[in-house]
Image (spheres, helix red, strand yellow):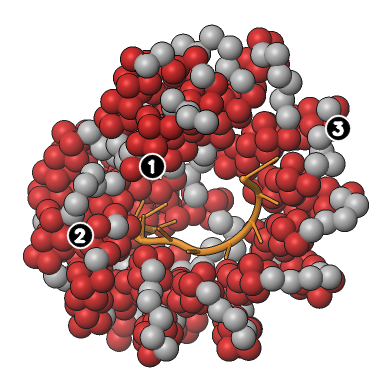
Amino acid sequence: MSKPHRFSLSLLTNCKTLKSLKQIHAQVLKKGLDSDPFVAGKLLLHCSINLSDSLDYAHRLFTYTPNPDAFMYNTLIRGLGESETPQKSLSIFTHMLGYSNSPPDSFSFAFLLKGAANARCLRMGSQLHCQALVRGLDSHAFVGTTIVSMYAECGIVDFSRKMFDEMPEPNVVAWNAMLTAYFRCYDLKGAEGIFYLMPFRDLTSMNVMLAGYTKVGELELAKKLFLGMLIKDDVSWSTIIIGLAHSGSYDEALSYFRELRRLGLTPNEVSLTGVLSACAQSGALAFAITLHGFIEKSGMVWILSVNNALLDTYSKCGSLDMACLVFKRMPGKKSIVSWTSMVTGLAMQGYGEGAIKLFNEMKESGTKPDGITFISILKACSHAGLIEQGYKIFSKMTEEYGIDPTIEHYGCVVNLYGRAGLLQKAYDFVIQMPIPPTAIIWRTLLGACSFFGDVVLAERVKERLAKADPDNSGDHVLLSNTYAVAGKQNDVVMTRESMAELKMKKIPGWSMIEVDKF
DNA sequence: ATAGGGTTAG
């Protein structure tokens, strides 16, 4: 039997861009195949799941379909649930309840609940749980497993366990979800309890344990488990490498990578980004260069995340030239990570103006900066002493980009004023902040006071700090430093403890005073 | 379709 829609749909396999999808869509319309639910469903699936940045088009495609079937509803829900705004999938769900002939099924709930998990929205998740319960779909294996994960993502592992205990015959996926749930909440004892209770384990169970051990800082247990594993896949390898890189064991991360190569295995892009991150943090430039060679040879230069990790490694190792080269030669669209990494690199090497210039280029390229980008650029400004520019950028953050500043952003501004000696301005800024200043904020300001020897303001800040952090430590050192810088070192008597503290800890500015003076 | 590894700041 010949199927007239086969030709058009086979094109979807190689369809990588929205532009080519639009061409296929045009073909479909020309042949009058758009009323075929199978064709319409495949098209929608491709632009809401397989392509990135094509959700708007998917939404339009859906809107212009007269009577979307359950597959189309579920596909759009799925696409929205994986997007930056998973809550939007709820409006499709509401539409489904009101206008569709097909009621929501197990697929709908699995995707909606995944969206709630992605959004870490307990309200959304628990309401969907109720809806599923009413429809008798909470006992469905896929739905139930997603509910277990959802509660853990929302930070309530007890609810995950309750849901799990209600499952009559949990399969290995459900067991693994419960195991993951405990680690997500850093509950090692709970995870171990499940692991020993599991009637069956697969490679995923082992990899979850591996990742969990490194997450809670049990590196020895992780290494022991890894060595004992008879079967390892690429996830096992990347998990141990990334776990070590995250825990500060950079040399060991490199060792495991070498071992992987020695066994003749091919690293994938995840283990490569992991080992590059270890290089970046430890300054292992020589190793990074050999990795770069491998990446070029193996044809992985086309992978965005690998390029991002590579340029970040070069810039952190002080090789700005190479970082620029990787950045410029990157194939395809640069991501927010590429831009932010490059901005940070320039800022850290002291090129404040260069960082701002690149930040502007980023905006022109159409990439929207996020909260992390603003931390980098604000740091660049305070480093380079660009106070006006910095504050302007900080204002734009809310006004132009609608990003709510976090305490870290406020800290950057305090640092910006503080380093420039605008202490009163910094103090006034802290007083009018919409979120309560933390001890870190006050300590930043106290550090600035000590640097410039502003005794009066330092005393005022000290009182605020004492309220924010009653069992503060190290602050009297900063305060006495202030007096020292102001030439009034006799006003504060240093105790033996604070002297020791001064020598032990690297408190900002401590080297400015000679300890012998006290 | 449900479970495991990811690069940017701090």
Q: Do the residues labelled 3 and 2 touch (CB within 8 Å)?
A: no
For mark 1, does the 10 Å Cα neighbourhood hold few (<14), some (14 to 19), or many (20 or more) residues?
few
Q: Mark 1 lies on which chain?
A: A
Above or below: residue A400 compared with residue A457 = above
Which sits earlier in the primary sequence, circle 3 or circle 2? 3
Give the side of residue A171 with respect to residue A422, left or right: right
State the residue position of label 3.
Answer: A136
* Residue A405 figure quarter: top left
Mark linked to residue A380: none
For mark 2, does the 10 Å Cα neighbourhood hold few (<14), some (14 to 19), or many (20 or more) residues?
many
For mark 2, give the secondary structure. Answer: helix
Q: Which chain carries label 2?
A: A
Q: Which of A374 and A292 is in front in this view?
A: A292
For mark 3, give the secondary structure. Answer: loop
Count of all numbered marks drawn on residues in the image? 3
Q: Nearer the viewer, residue A358 or A224?
A: A224
Above or below: residue A288 compared with residue A433 = below
